[in-house]
Image (cartoon, grey):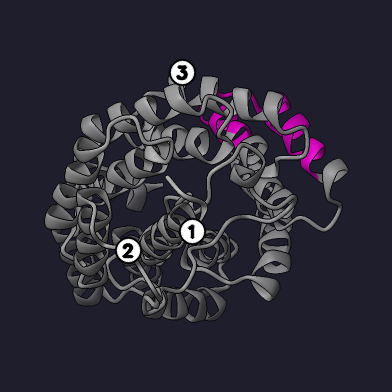
């Protein structure tokens, strides 16, 4: 492949990746090379805003180019199944192409969007076979393992990231959360303190310590820590965690404000309706509580879990 054609291919792959990057939590690889696959130190990756594709002077004579170009069109229209098929066609058209790690990664991400988790794991793994030091690929596969309740495999991938990137805070944060879930609060605190050593201003440190304090029953301190992150980078999950602390502290108006703002950001999050049900229970608004319970159930929470949470 000539230099000009290779540059055109990379620009097209970047356009495909950028379109994917605005759609979900999975990080999307948009360049080839071990060093470029590392996340920025001290920052929690956020989805990038999707942009309209603009690629000039493309040579679309080869089936490989044509398939990627078609995938880009369907990604832009959010037609994940058809986009996936076009990327598979690109891979099949040139299975020895050195850029196929990126192709496989984006196929896996599209499959993840569609809930095809086993297939996504397979393709992230195939991509890692080609680029075994790709930190972003490891982070994506680890996050997918978490979704699949494969904690041991997720931990293996996150620990591998820590070996490859001594300054990676995201992997340490995720390992800390997993440690808490396994009841190892001391290890979680050690991992969060590692983040602070790497980047004293990291939001991930404050968020992790907020979760740890909440788990230990230090709700006022947890709310303070969540607030430090929310001031800089508000999101529905942080607001929900702070609202939960406020409910326990009986700061009901503050909890209501957080739940309202979080629902504006993430109206399909069932946990937020559970929090509002708790709020309505504390205010003795039974009808409103029941409506929120039904909404949480409709969005995927089990009645047993909701019942247990409301009784706590």
Under tag 1, what secondary structure? helix
Q: Nearer the viewer, mark 3 or mark 1?
A: 1
- How crowded pointer 3 is (Cα within 10 Å; few <14, some 14-19, many 20+) is rated as few
Residue drawn at the location 51% of the way across and 75% of the way down: 258
What's the mark number on residue 67?
A: none
Residue 74: image location, x then y, percent: 19, 65
Q: Please, what secondary structure does the residue beneath circle 3 have?
A: helix
Q: Nearer the viewer, residue 65 or 284?
A: 65
Image quarter in which the N terminus is found: top left
User: Mark 1, residues whose alpha carbon is within 10 Å: few (<14), some, or many (≥20)?
Assistant: few
| Tally of marks | 3
Determine whether 97 is above or below 253 in the image: above
Query: What label sits on residue 59 in the rendered view?
Result: 2
Question: What residue would you read off at disc 3?
Answer: 152
Q: In the image, residue 255 lies at what x, y percent? A: 51, 73
Name the dominant secondary structure of the magenta segment.
Answer: helix
| Magenta stretch bounds | 175-195
Q: Which residue lies under the disc numbered 1? A: 4
> Do the CB atoms of the residues marked 3 and 2 lie less than 8 Å apart?
no
Whole-angstrom CA distance, mark 1 to mark 2, is 9 Å
Q: Is residue 250 above or below residue 82?
A: below
Measuring 87% from the left and 41% from the top, which residue is drawn there? 197
Q: Are marks 1 and 2 in contact (CB under 8 Å)?
A: yes
**Residue 185 magenta-drawn?**
yes
């Amino acid at each position: 492949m000539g230099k000009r054609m290779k540059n055109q291919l990379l620009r097209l792959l970047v356009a495909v990746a950028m379109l994917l990057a605005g759609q979900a939590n999975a990080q999307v690889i948009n360049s080839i090379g071990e060093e470029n696959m590392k996340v920025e130190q001290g920052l929690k990756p956020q989805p990038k805003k999707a942009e309209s594709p603009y690629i000039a002077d493309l040579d679309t004579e080869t089936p490989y180019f044509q398939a990627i170009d078609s995938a880009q069109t369907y990604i832009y229209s959010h037609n994940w199944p058809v986009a996936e098929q076009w990327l598979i066609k690109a891979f099949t058209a040139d299975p020895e192409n050195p850029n196929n790690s990126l192709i496989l990664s984006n196929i896996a991400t599209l499959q993840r969007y569609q809930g095809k988790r086993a297939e996504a794991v397979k393709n992230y793994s195939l991509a890692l076979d080609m680029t075994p030091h790709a930190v972003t690929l490891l982070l994506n596969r680890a996050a997918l393992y978490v979704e699949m309740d494969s904690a041991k495999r997720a931990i293996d991938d996150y620990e591998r990231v820590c070996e490859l990137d001594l300054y990676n805070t995201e992997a340490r944060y995720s390992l800390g959360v997993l440690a808490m879930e396994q009841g190892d609060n001391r290890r979680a605190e050690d991992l969060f303190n590692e983040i602070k050593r790497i980047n004293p201003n990291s939001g991930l440190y404050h968020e992790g310590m907020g979760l740890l304090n909440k788990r230990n029953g230090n709700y006022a301190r947890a709310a303070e820590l969540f607030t430090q992150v929310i001031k800089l980078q508000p999101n529905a999950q942080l607001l929900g965690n702070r609202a939960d602390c406020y409910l326990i502290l009986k700061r009901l108006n503050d909890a209501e404000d957080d739940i309202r703002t979080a629902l504006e950001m993430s109206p399909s999050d069932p946990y937020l309706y559970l929090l509002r049900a708790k709020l309505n229970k504390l205010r003795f608004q039974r009808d409103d509580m029941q409506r929120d319970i039904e909404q949480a159930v409709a969005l995927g929470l089990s009645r047993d879990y909701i019942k247990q949470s409301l009784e706590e």
